Amino acid sequence: MKPVNLYEVHNHKGEVEWGGSSEREAVVWFRRGLDRKIYVSVWDEANELDFKLITDKIDVTKLVLTTLTEVRG
């Protein structure tokens, strides 16, 4: 098994604006507006032709906001 985190940043309409495996890029996209949400899911990428979902999307918006606030603070 090769678990990989997939991050998605959604706009206020629920549309995906960005998706990828980079935590840094996810936060950069997330910080572009106050109306965004950030989710993470885990995928098994052991077989490049057949990725399998391990963990459904989890809303980590509050966690990221709290962390960003504490870092500034």
Image: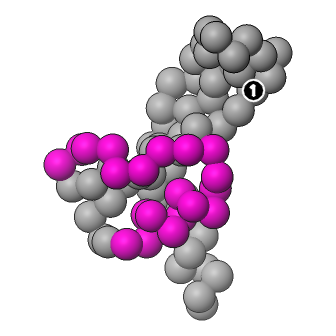
Does residue 61 appear to the left or right of 11 in the view shown? right
The foreground one among 11 and 20 is 20
Q: Position of residue 45 (x, y in %)?
A: 71, 21
State the extent of the magenta-drawn residues as a range: 13-32
Give the farthest residue toward the right.
1
Does residue 48 appear to the left or right of 8 in the view shown? right
Q: Position of residue 5 (x, y in %)?
A: 65, 37
Q: Residue at x 48, y 32 (%)?
A: 57
Q: Looking at the figure, which quarter contains the C terminus?
A: bottom right
Q: Residue at x 43, y 63 (%)?
A: 30
Picture quarter containing residue 37? bottom left
Is 47 rendered above or below residue 5?
above
**Is residue 21 in view from this perspective?**
yes
**Is residue 54 in view from this perspective?**
no
**Pointer 1: residues within 10 angstroms few (<14), some, or many (20+)?**
some
The reply to whether the magenta stretch includes residue 21 is: yes
Residue tagged 1: 3
Q: Looking at the figure, which quarter contains the N terminus?
A: top right
Is 12 rendered above or below residue 47?
below
The kind of secondary structure element at disc 1 is: strand
Is 47 rendered above or below residue 26?
above
Does residue 55 appear to the left or right of 14 in the view shown? right
Q: How is the image coloured?
A: one colour
Name the amino acid, label 1.
Pro
Q: Residue at x 59, y 88 (%)?
A: 72
Q: Position of residue 8 (x, y in %)?
A: 46, 45
Q: Position of residue 29 (x, y in %)?
A: 45, 64
The reply to whether the magenta stretch includes residue 22 is: yes
